[in-house]
Each structure stands twice: as C-alpha cells, then as structure tokens.
Image (cartoon, rainbow, N blue to C red):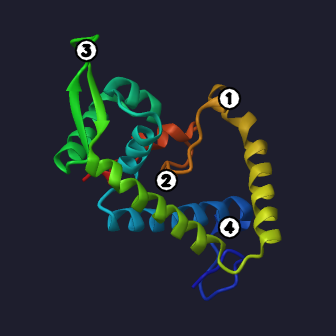
Amino acid sequence: METLSGSGSGDIPSAARIGPVSYAIFRISRMHRMLAGHLLRDVGLHPRQALVMRKLWERGGMRQVDLAELVGSDPATMTRTVKRLERAGLVCRIPSPTDKRSVIVEPTAAGRELRHKVESTRTDLEHQLTNGLSEAARAEVLAVLERLERNLAPGVGDDADCPIDADEPSSAVGTPCPTRWLESDRSDER
C-alpha cells in the first residue's frame, strides 16, 4: 500500500511528487469521507441527509427553501432529500402558517432520537482519525490545518466567507465553496 510519504510498493503519482501536501490532504479527505459515509450508513443516513438533520436539530423546524439555502442545495435536490427523510420517518413537512407556498420541515420524535447515534459516529470518526496521537500532537495537527485553511481562504475569492462545515462532502475538487460540494456529488443520492 502506498503511503502519504511515498514509501510503499506502487509508483508515486505525479500529483504526489508535484504537490505532496495537497496530495496528502486529498487522500486523507477522501478516506475521511469514505469512513464517515460508512459510519452514517450504519445509522441509516448518507452525508447529505445527516447534514440536513443536523441543521434541523440545531435550529429547529424551518422552511424547506431556507434549509436548502443553509446547506447549499438546490430546491429540487432538497425536495428529494426531505422526501427520503420523510419516508424514513425522520422529518415531517407541514404547511407554513405564514406562506401558503412554503412548507416547514421539522424533525419527528424518531428524527430527534437519531441525533445521539449521529453524534456518536462523529466521535468514533474523531477517535479513529487521531488514534495514537498525544494531546500535544492533536493540538499541533489542528494548528497546522487551521494555518492551511487560512492560506487557502484568499484563493477562493468571493466565496471566502462561505460556510465551511465539517460534515460536508469533500469530493468535488476544484469547487471554490465547500457548500457547493453537496450539489456536485450526486453519488450520495439513494
């Protein structure tokens, strides 16, 4: 197996030779996303659904259009996501009392009960990611990652202040705003 440092049995890709830090981040991000997806599947969700549920847990019921905007989704994708969550019994849609064209999406009792399981998957993922690192090493890794994020922020232009969310998929390389990654990765659709 090829490692991030390049020691391993395979040839080192040119991307790893040209930009070893970028390539390492790409590989770690990809593995992190794969493991997160696996852990979420164990509780019956995929990453987009988990993001939607988390926003509802944190902010309470809201108009579907506002929820779509909050997670960087287009209306059609949000409609499909909410319908799947509704069929699973995790959310309900009710007509807006103030706008007859809108619906309010709210977590059901079953949806609220799922919160602990989803949060446990985050804890499990964090433990696996930092396994074997001392507290000092964890702090150092975090400081380096924060520095890398600051270094990249000016390069994303107008999207520099877009919300960056740890639960958002990271597979659409080259997309300036991480919230747009939700829309570009249709492979998560069920």
Which label sits in the foreground, 4 or 1? Answer: 1
**Residue at the (54%, 49%) spot, across then down:** 173
Determine the secondary structure under disc 4. helix
Which numbered disc, 3 or 1, marks the residue that appears first in the sequence?
Answer: 3
Rate crowding at label 2 as few (under 14), some (14 to 19) or many (20 or more) other CA atoms within 10 Å. Answer: some
- Which residue is disc 2 drawn over? 171
Element assignment for label 3: loop
Q: Are marks 4 and 2 in contact (CB under 8 Å)?
A: no
N-term-proximal mark, 2 vs 1: 1
Figure check: 33 above or below 62? below
Whether residue 111 sits left or right of residue 159 in the image: it is left
Q: Quadrant of residue 123?
A: bottom right
Q: Label 1 belongs to which residue?
A: 157
Q: Nearer the viewer, residue 6 or 111?
A: 111
Q: Earlier in the sequence, mark 4 or mark 2?
A: 4
Q: CA–CA distance between discs 2 and 3?
A: 38 Å
Total numbered labels: 4
Q: Which residue is mark 3?
A: 97
Location of residue 10 in the rendering, given as x and y in whole percent from the top left corner: 59, 84
Q: Residue sitting at 29 percent across and 32 percent down?
A: 105
Q: Which mark is residue 16?
A: 4
Q: Are marks 2 and 3 in contact (CB under 8 Å)?
A: no
